[in-house]
Amino acid sequence: MRKNRNEVQIIFEFMLEINDGNSQTSSLLRKVNIPFNKYQELIQQLKDRGMLSVTPDGSKTVLELTDKGKEFLEQYKKFSKMMEKSYGLSL
């Protein structure tokens, strides 16, 4: 059973899926387990923060992390490992 996630954990999971090449809306909604309105909110927040680029490609929309978005993923992973190793807390 999945624990309740906070906003940062949801953002991390969402961005991790995009970084792995998953940019299909239905797949992201299912894998990250969020409703469509939350999906739209995340897209807008990440675009506004310069962490995500959204490019129309015919009938599809391509989502790609910017360098800032990739840096967030790396820093989150490092912080998560440190919390686990030093304090026994998992994020």
Image (tube, grey):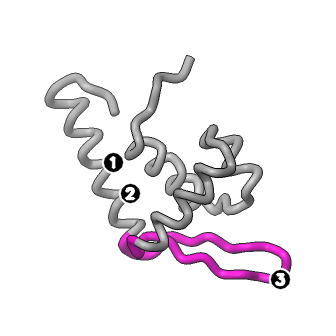
Measure the C-alpha gap from mark 3 to mark 2: 29 Å
The reply, left or right, for residue 87 in relation to residue 36 is left
Decide: marks 1, 2 in contact (CB < 8 A)? yes
Q: Quadrant of the N terminus?
A: top right
**Residue furthest out toward the left:** 86
Q: Amino acid at mark 3?
A: Gly
Residue 5: name its quadrant.
Answer: top left
Mark 3 lies on residue: 58
Give neighbour class at mark 2: few <14, some 14-19, many 20+ (Cα, 10 Å).
some
Residue 73's disc is 2
Measure the C-alpha gap from mark 3 to mark 1: 34 Å
By secondary structure, the bulk of the magenta-drawn segment is best described as strand
Residue 62: say if magenta.
yes
Q: Amino acid at mark 2?
A: Leu
Image spot of residue 80 (x, y percent): 29, 40
Mark 3 vs mark 2: which is more N-terminal? 3
Residue 15's disc is none
The region drawn magenta spans 49-68
Residue 16's place in the image compared with 5, above or below, is below
Q: Residue at x 72, y 73 (%)?
A: 61
Q: Quadrant of the C terminus?
A: top left
Which element carries disc 1, helix, strand or loop? helix
Image spot of residue 18 (x, y percent): 58, 60
Mark 1 lies on residue: 77
Q: Residue at x 45, y 75 (%)?
A: 66
Give neighbour class at mark 1: few <14, some 14-19, many 20+ (Cα, 10 Å).
some
